[in-house]
Image (cartoon, rainbow, N blue to C red):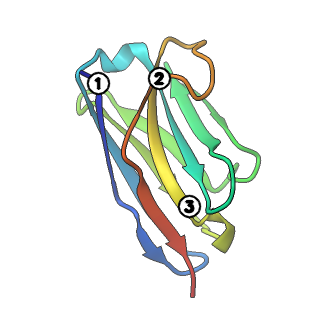
Amino acid sequence: QVQLVESGGGLVQPGGSLKLSCVASGFTFTSYRMSWYRQAPGKEREMVAAERSGFTNYADSVKGRFTIYRDNAKNTVYLQMNSLKPEDTAVYYCNAAYGAYAPPFSGAWGQGTQVTVSS
């Protein structure tokens, strides 16, 4: 079955960087759109970044600061987060959805990893 395991979260000061990783198994990695979502306390889950066949898209709030990329040989998708702000604090979830046009919020989810940006 589809399994997604995130890692790399933690506590970082404003302006700092973190790299999240999501190792995938149980499906043909290259056939899936891979995305990162996040959910802050009291807020709805939102898409942060998505990648499919080299095409990427980002939430406006993270453009220029976050980068999504994948290593197909390792079945892993990454989220490099730079210039972090307190408002980036959230639980970050990895998502795998089949095909380039899968609806948002569809597919399989990881268990989430906490990112806290605070001084």
Residue drawn at (36%, 46%), measured in percent from left and top? 111
Give the vertical position of 56 relative to 58 (above or below): above
Q: Nearer the viewer, residue 61 or 96?
A: 96
Q: Amino acid at mark 2?
A: Gly
State whether residue 51 is above or below residue 6. above
For marks 3 and 2, give the CA distance.
20 Å
Q: Secondary structure at mark 3?
A: strand
Answer whether labels 3 and 1 touch (C-beta < 8 Å).
no
Sequence-wise, which precedes: disc 1 or disc 2? 1
Indicate whether 113 appears above or below 67.
below
Q: Is residue 11 visible?
A: yes
Examine the image and state in which quarter residue 113 appears: bottom left
CA separation, marks 1 and 2?
9 Å
Q: Residue at x 49, y 19 (%)?
A: 53
Q: Amino acid at mark 1?
A: Val
Closest to the observer: 29 or 38? 38
Name the N-terminal-most of marks 3 and 1.
1
Report the side of 88 relative to 51 (left or right). right
Badge 3 crowding class, 10 Å Cα cut-off, few under 14, some 14 to 19, many 20 or more, is: many
Residue 63: x and y in percent read 70, 49
> In the rendered image, which residue does mark 3 sit on?
90
Task: Please indicate whether residue 83 sits to the left or right of residue 76 in the image.
Answer: right
Q: Which mark is residue 2?
A: 1
Report the residue marked by disc 2. 107
The disc, 3 or 2, on the residue closer to the chain's N-terminal end is 3
The amino acid pointed to by label 3 is Ala
* In contact (CB < 8 Å): disc 1 and disc 2: yes
Secondary structure beneath dot 1 equals loop
